[in-house]
Image: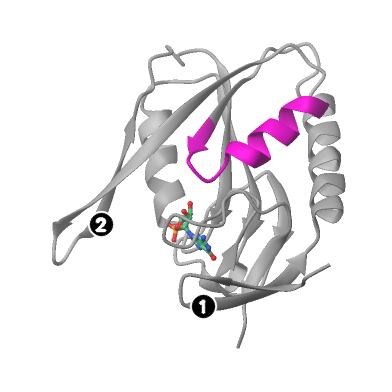
Amino acid sequence: MQSTIQVHDKHFEVFIEKNVIEHRINELASQINQDYEGKRPLFLAILNGSFMFAAELMKSVTVACEITFLRVSSYQATESSGKVHQILGLLENIEGRDVIVVEDIVDTGLTMVEIKAQLLAQNPASLSITTLFQKPEALRQPIDIQYIGFEIENKFVLGYGLDYDGLGRNLGDLYVLCE
Ligand code: 5GP
């Protein structure tokens, strides 16, 4: 197996193999199955990055559930307030629903804090978050995440849905930027 790859101008090496990732996703699904027994959660998967995680997770979720996909737009508001994230494409009424947000990676946490606030404003019965990867050292705002796949070091990663300038989302293993 070739373990180092080039994407655009950068080199990446295998960091977490596909079978390890998928084993862990299976564990997250088991936990969700226990916690949501008798409920009918609505999964909100954030595109593009979470498509592979969401697909794998759903295969092991056994409680009755629904899934829909959202995008988050990011734009510069003012120089002082920085970037603002807005949810696009949420057509479902989430009032009174048990919502589980499905994210690829939480880095600074700023995106997730804003998504969470916008979803809570719509009065779901409950809201929890699952992210496949989290970089604890990069976190700039405290945020409660109920289901975390892997805590990883603060380095740029690629694969398993995550891209580098559009490429690499299709890679089954997770890669990390070579030093
Ligand atoms: P945050 O607002 O938590 O800083 O950013 C979260 C978003 O940044 C993720 O949904 C993802 O799109 C992107 N991101 C953060 N870290 C990485 C990384 O290491 N690799 C890739 N490909 N995207 C990342």
Coordinates of residue 176 in the picture (x, y in percent): 64, 72
Q: Residue furthest bottom?
A: 179
The one of 51 and 136 positioned closer to us in this rendering:
51
Which range of residues does the magenta coloring cover?
45-60
SS of the residue under disc 2: strand
Q: Earlier in the sequence, mark 2 or mark 1?
A: 1
Where is mark 1, residue-wise?
10
Mostly what secondary structure, the magenta segment?
helix
Q: Is residue 120 left or right of residue 107?
A: left
Q: Is residue 12 left or right of residue 141?
A: right
**Residue 57 belongs to magenta span:** yes
Coordinates of residue 178 in the picture (x, y in percent): 62, 83
The one of 94 and 4 positioned closer to us in this rendering:
4
How far, Cα to Cα, is label 2 from label 1? 26 Å
Where is mark 2, residue-wise?
83
**Quadrant for the C terminus in the image:** bottom right
Q: Residue at x 79, y 52 (%)?
A: 21
Coordinates of residue 73 in the picture (x, y in percent): 30, 42
**Quadrant for the N terminus in the image:** bottom right
Which amino acid lies under the numbered mark 2 shown in the image of this protein? Lys
Query: Which of the 4 image quadrants contains residue 6?
Result: bottom right
Q: Is mark 2 within 8 Å of ligand 1?
A: no
Q: Residue at x 51, y 12 (%)?
A: 96
